[in-house]
Image (spheres, rainbow, N blue to C red):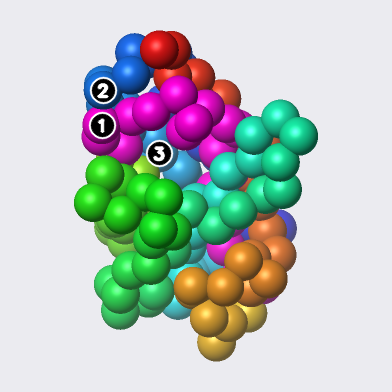
Amino acid sequence: QVQLVESGGGLVQAGGSLRISCAASGRTFSSYAMGWLRQAPGKERELVAGISISGSTYYADSVKGRFTISRDNAKNTVYLQMNSLKPEDTAVYYCATPKYTYYYYAALCSYGYWGQGTQVTVSS
């Protein structure tokens, strides 16, 4: 049973920074891509960042240069460092991972397991 537990969300002012974390369990963490998705009210869920098993990364255009995804295989944890936050970054952020090891880390449709989400609110 794959479990993903996010932490670290909260309220931050525009221009500020926040780091969210996701602890994974239930299978060999290092063998699967990991990603962060977000969903704002009234909007579709989008892939914000993904990281492959080899450490290759993907970022949505809207967060390039501001967000950094990283993983610590020894701790079974993936992180999303968010800098220069904007009000439009306000959303529920979900940690996610594909069901199969060969699924592409940079495609939203690859992600079949989700955490419960953590709220990130950026005030103007």
Judged from the image, the secondary structure of the residue bearing numbered disc 1 is loop
Q: Residues within 10 Å of mark 3 (few under 14, many from 20)?
A: many
Specify the quadrant of the image occupied by residue 103: bottom right
Residue 17 in the figure: left or right of residue 53: left
Q: Residues within 10 Å of mark 2 (few under 14, many from 20)?
A: some
Q: What's the distance in space between the residues labelled 2 and 3, CA to CA? A: 20 Å
Whole-percent x and y of residue 83? 25, 34
Judged from the image, the secondary structure of the residue bearing numbered disc 3 is strand
Q: Amino acid at mark 1?
A: Ser
Q: Residues within 10 Å of mark 1 (few under 14, many from 20)?
A: some
Question: To which residue does mark 3 refer?
Answer: 21
State if disc 2 and disc 1 touch (CB < 8 Å): yes
Q: What's the distance in space between the residues labelled 1 and 2, CA to CA? A: 4 Å
Q: Amino acid at mark 2?
A: Gly
- Which disc, if any, is residue 15? 2
Residue 43 visible at all: yes
Q: Earlier in the sequence, mark 1 or mark 2?
A: 2
Question: To which residue does mark 1 refer?
Answer: 84
The residue shown at (23%, 51%) is: 65
Q: Is residue 90 magenta?
A: yes
Q: Amino acid at mark 3?
A: Ser
Residue 77 in the figure: left or right of residue 83: right
What range is drawn magenta here?
82-99
The residue shown at (67%, 49%) is: 45
